[in-house]
Amino acid sequence: MPAEKKPGPSVKDDELYEKLREEGNSKEKSARIANAAAAKGRSAVGRKGGSSPAYEEWTVEELRERAAELDVEGRSSMRKDELVEALREH
């Protein structure tokens, strides 16, 4: 078996990071959640967040703007369903 690889020094909660990666989250998203949990506590991170409509309720233009904020490549030629999928995977 290969040796276990650490995520890096910038990740503050390795255990949570690995769990999130196993669930299929991106490296960036996993690191953000793990670091927020380490800083504020896991239960505080779970309560955090606002309300936002589901991506399916957004217009294509709104989805492209959000994709631009996240530097999603190929966003200008994506259809709505592709934008939704790309944003969820980010």
Image (spheres, helix red, strand yellow):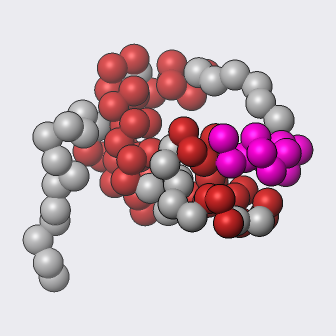
* Residue 61 x %, y %: 77, 45
Q: In this view, does 73 lie to the left or right of 37?
A: right
Please name whichever residue, 70 or 27, is drawn nearer the observer in this view of the structure.
70
* Residue 90 x %, y %: 52, 53
The quadrant holding residue 46 is top right
The quadrant holding residue 58 is top right
Instruction: Determine the main secondary structure of the stretch shown in magenta.
Output: helix
The quadrant holding residue 31 is top left
Determine the residue positioned at 45% across, 45% down: 29
* Quadrant assignment for the N terminus: bottom left
Residue 25 is at least partly visible in this image? no
Residue 69 is at least partly visible in this image? yes
Residue 82 against residue 33 in the figure, above or below: below
Q: For the view shown, which residue lies furthest in the right direction?
A: 57
Q: For the view shown, which residue lies furthest in the front direction?
A: 76
Q: Is residue 29 left or right of residue 7?
A: right
Please name whichever residue, 41 or 9, is drawn nearer the observer in this view of the structure.
9
Q: Is residue 84 magenta?
A: no
* Residue 65 x %, y %: 66, 41
Task: Give the mark count.
Answer: 0
Residue 89 against residue 12 in the figure, above or below: below
Residue 54 against residue 72 in the figure, above or below: above
* Residue 22 x %, y %: 43, 62
Determine the residue positioned at 53% across, 54% down: 72
Determine the residue positioned at 60% across, 48% down: 67
Q: For the view shown, which residue lies furthest in the bottom direction?
A: 1
Residue 23 against residue 28 in the figure, above or below: below
The region drawn magenta spans 54-65
